[in-house]
Amino acid sequence: MKKSITVMGSTGSVGTSTVDLLKRSPELFDVEALTANKNVDLLAQQAIELNAKMAVVADKKAYNDLKNALSGKDIEVAAGEEALLEAAARPADQVMAAIVGFAGLAPTLTAIKRGATILLANKEALVCAGDLMVEEVRKNNATLLPVDSEHNAIFQVFDFDNKFGIDHITLTASGGPFRCFTKQEMETVTPQQALAHPNWDMGAKISIDSATMMNKGLELIEAAYLFGLPEDRIKVLIHPQSIIHSTVSYIDGSVLAQLGDPDMRTPIACALAWPERMKTPVKQLDLAEISKLTFETPDHDKFPALEIAREALRNHKTIVFNAANEIAVEAFLQKRMSFLGISELVEKAVCTFDEIDINSLETVKMVDAEVRNWSRAQIN
Ligand code: NDP
């Protein structure tokens, strides 16, 4: 049976991989809505190719361009934050949440509130408002399917019916472009160097997060909410080849892992087709060709992000961790702060702010804005 789908953030890295799969399997999906921030040309092209019912740009200044690009087509056009929420509220079976950062939270919550199946790439939403999101999923009988490759891997081998049999989970991490750099060498790295990820082709923000290992910190928090585990049962292992995407260790000593070529179209397809499977163009894994897989423990002195994330999770300050990081990444990309300054700022923010009880979207927005203002002032 055909499923209907809305793709939030269709012009980004996860978004375009999703669109690629939807284009290859038109017999499986009807596209309800597509959204972007301001990339009008790509959004219009995708909307036409996929015969979408609606196309939305978050940036109101881009409305006229989108309207012109889609003139004569039977595609509804809208712009602004309200329009994003409207797209999320439309009756699609599935919503791909692939907007980057905090901006993705409100549309994702809107889709959850109507009981949709959320394909969650936007990890920052869960990091900012994990308790609230999990509660809304339960209340509204929504479904949350992880798209992040590590969480999707765990999802595929996690025995939800026998959770008592699970000892711990392990998130693998490539180590990013600076795994072999000394701390001194990392002092002077440029945004261009940090954007060049060795294994994955991703958007700018997550590429910087991978280089600092803030991404693994965000993923640790994401895993805690998705799988209901405390941080001391979530381990992290450096695996530079990115072939084993994560593992689940059972109390009898068994370790189940999911493996695959590092191509986001595999976890995206897994979520799109769940509980079935769909074909993708991803190359089949050839272990003989790869021949060697290696592993290392993370170096917490060079990459303090993981320990900061654990501290934030234990003390209910994950929203602080996220907001300070988003501002620091933006400043680093604009060459207004150093690479090592990112972790320093996030650590200082987590130490400075008090424990926070998140019970509504309004509280989340207020705290997020407060931490952002504080972070900007620190950078200035
Ligand atoms: P990109 O930066 O490539 O794309 C982001 C998308 O969000 C674009 O469509 C962009 O539109 C849109 N967008 C940006 N800002 C806003 C805003 N304020 N309001 C509405 N839409 C906005 O990001 P990625 O695809 O790399 O990442 C998306 C999410 O998925 C992130 O949370 C990331 O952590 C997560 N993720 C990404 C992976 C990857 O391989 N890239 C892997 C696992 C998780 P426009 O193009 O117009 O700017």
Image (cartoon, rainbow, N blue to C red):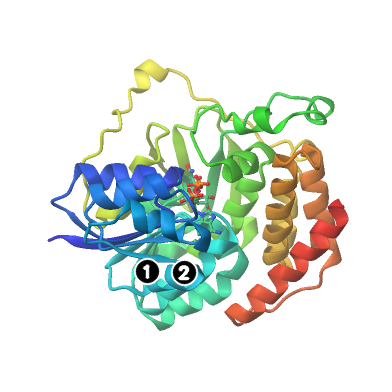
Q: Amino acid at mark 1?
A: Ala
Per the model, the C-alpha gap separating discs 1 and 2 is 8 Å
Identify the residue position indicated by label 2 in the image.
Answer: 107
Instruction: From the top left corner, tell me how far across and down residue 353 is, in percent.
Output: 82, 68
Mark 1 vs mark 2, foreground winner is: 1
Residue nearer the viewer, 372 or 141:
372
> Looking at the image, which residue is at 85% across and 56% down?
348
The correct choice, above or below, for 107 with respect to 189 in the image is below
Label drawn at residue 87? 1
* Pointer 1 or 2: first along the chain: 1
Q: Is residue 316 visible?
A: no
> Looking at the image, which residue is at 61% across and 33% down?
195
- The residue carrying pointer 1 sits among few (fewer than 14), some (14 to 19) or many (20 or more) residues within 10 Å by Cα, namely many
Side (left or right) of 205 relative to 162: right
Instruction: From the top left corner, tell me how far across and down residue 80 is, in percent.
Output: 49, 67
Number of on-image labels: 2
